[in-house]
Amino acid sequence: MKRLLVMLTGLVFIIVLAGCSKENIKSKSMEQIYAEEGVPVKTTSVELTEFTKSQFYYGILTGIRESSAYASFGDKIEKINVKVGDYVKKDQVLLTFPTDVPGAQYHQAKIALETIEKTYKRMKTLLTGGAISQQDYDNVKAQYDVSKTNWETVKKMIKVKAPLTGYVTKINVRETETVHREAELFTIANTEKLKTSIWITDEDYNDIKIGQKAIAKWNSHKITGKVVQVDMAMNIMKQAFGVMLEFDNPENAIKTGITAEIKLITEQKNSTIVISKKDMFTEDGKDFVYLAKDGKAVKRFINTGSRSGLKFEVVGGLNLNDKLISEGQMLVKDGTKIRIITKG
């Protein structure tokens, strides 16, 4: 039994040794292949392309102009003339309260105006005939102007009008419902354009400028706009600078009040050389790439400019139509023999 165990152990050792030898032979054989035929690589032709540097934020989109109407007193709603989504004109009557609301004094104001108006017209005739003094006429006219203003105010309280032209985006009340004083009744928004505010850090401040293009995305909808304001003072509470953006919203594709992803394009070049981070190496603080030239890998130092994610703009060191090694670059060094298996 002991002799059998020794024989088996020896056999296992021989098998393991043989396996290791085969691996060494295989590895050595691959090195020989690379030396004889060249390291297989793929190349990409250096060309001019578009380079875009972007930053992403989130913002709540609202109408470019937006306003709400509030109840001037507490009472029940008599009539609502519109529904959410309706397009209305400025000063169009959207909602009414009963005319007998005690707090409005609708009928009292109407009677007071009618009474003083008769007196005013009579005094105006007497002034023309020289029967009264200018002072007497001015006193009556002042009373008439006050009564007229009061009447207009009361009418606005009873018949609530649209504060601006736009779409009804929200109605907070229902007919016959009793509301409290200063309750928000409805909201009107001009949604042909939308706006939002974002907050940027002091590190990004110098990259953000008025006029830069922006894209707002919500679900499958995208709208374009631009930066219209960059605050010059930091908000102490947020420790950031406020930036205002405006967007065109054709056909009201995006609704107000939603949170959209904001893509802010801080730099855009239509014709420049761009390479990926994976194709770059660094040596002593200097960036370089490998090019394919005359069957060998050639190290080329480059100067980079702006960066966007894993893309770098190259401002020096590369020429158009240079063959950049884009696959297999990790297996080569300066002067390594290469074999191009796919040309780009």
Image: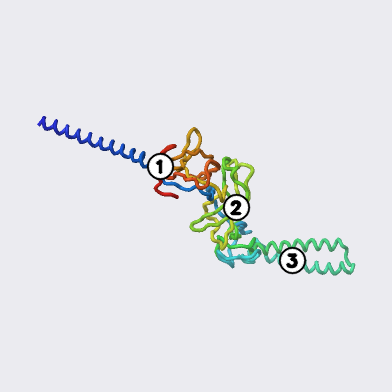
- Give the residue drawn at x 87%, y 68%: 128
In this rendering, is residue 187 above or below 293? Answer: below
Q: Closest to the observer: 200 or 296?
A: 296
The Cα atoms of the two marked residues, 3 and 2, are separated by: 51 Å
- The residue indicated by pointer 3 is 113
Q: Closest to the observer: 162 or 159?
A: 162
The Cα atoms of the two marked residues, 1 and 2, are separated by: 49 Å
- The residue indicated by pointer 2 is 226
Crowd rating for badge 3 (residues with CA inside 10 Å; few <14, some 14–19, many 20+): many
The type of residue carrying mark 3 is Leu
- Give the residue drawn at x 39%, y 48%: 341
Quarter-of-image position of residue 67: bottom right
In this rendering, is residue 25 above or below 144? Answer: above
The type of residue carrying mark 2 is Lys
Q: Are marks 1 and 2 in contact (CB under 8 Å)?
A: no
Image quadrant holding the N terminus, namely: top left
Per the image, label 1 sits on a secondary structure element best described as strand
Instruction: Say whether disc 3 or disc 1 marks the residue closer to the N-terminus.
Output: 3
Q: Are marks 3 and 2 in contact (CB under 8 Å)?
A: no
- The residue indicated by pointer 1 is 338
Query: From this viewpoint, is residue 109 visible?
Result: yes
Crowd rating for badge 2 (residues with CA inside 10 Å; few <14, some 14–19, many 20+): many
The Cα atoms of the two marked residues, 3 and 1, are separated by: 99 Å
Mark in front: 3 vs 1: 1
Mark in front: 1 vs 2: 1
Per the image, label 2 sits on a secondary structure element best described as strand
Left or right position of 158 against 135: left
The type of residue carrying mark 1 is Ile
The percent coordinates of residue 279 (x first, y second) are: 46, 42
Q: Closest to the observer: 322 or 112?
A: 322
